[in-house]
Image (cartoon, rainbow, N blue to C red):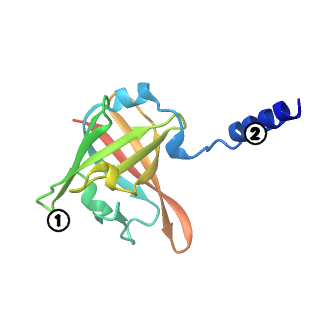
Amino acid sequence: MKKLSIIYLFVFMIIGCKSTSVTNTKLDNKTERMLKGNWTITAVNFAGSEYLKVNSFNIEDSNCFIGSNWSFISNNNEGEMALNNPSTDCKDFSSPITWYVNKDRNFVLKIINNHKAKDVNSGYILRLNNVTENSFELIDKINVAGQTKDITYSFQRK
């Protein structure tokens, strides 16, 4: 009986210590299907944007993402993003991406950029907001003078 109690205690501890990491939660397949397709970022907003520059996704200034094109494939959680605004001083950039939406409405993004997805160990967790058939927002957290602020990327369906 004592061995059985120890086994139950061990099983209880394993179940009780289950990870609640953002990357380990269940997927929101319905929302992922809503995002399937081609999108353009129409605006990037954050407090102090008229005075500050933010390097988005460690790629380029946040304003360079306005007009960028994104494609999301929901059945394999892959896609592509491309910055190609010829009217600005921004560099061109494109990369395959992997992405998914979890049940907590977090959008988890990896920018692959000439690597295999399994070799990319870093990514971004953004909050998904205001999802409709033709628009949605991704909200990231940035540090501005020691304070955490939101930066909002507004997407429109192409």
List the single residue furthest toward the bottom. 145
Identify the mark nearer the N-term, 2 or 1.
Answer: 2
Horizontal placement of 4 versus 68: left or right?
A: right
For the residue pair 5 and 107, the one nearer the viewer reads as 5
Helix, strand or loop at label 1? It is loop
Residue at image x 74%, y 41%? 13
Amino acid, disc 1: Lys
Q: Which mark is residue 32?
A: none
Q: Is residue 132 above or below residue 105?
A: above
- Residue on which the image places disc 2: 10
Q: 84 or 100: nearer the eye?
A: 100
Rendered-image quadrant of the C terminus: top left
x and y percentages locating residue 137 in the rendered image: 40, 43
Q: Is residue 136 above or below residue 61?
A: above
Residue 91's disc number: 1
The quarter of the picture where residue 135 lies is: top left
Q: Where residue 102 appears, x then y in whole percent?
A: 49, 36
Check the image and report above or below for 148 versus 10.
Answer: below
Residue drawn at the location 82% of the way across and 30% of the way down: 4
Image quarter for residue 75? top left
Q: Indicate the amino acid at tag 2.
A: Phe
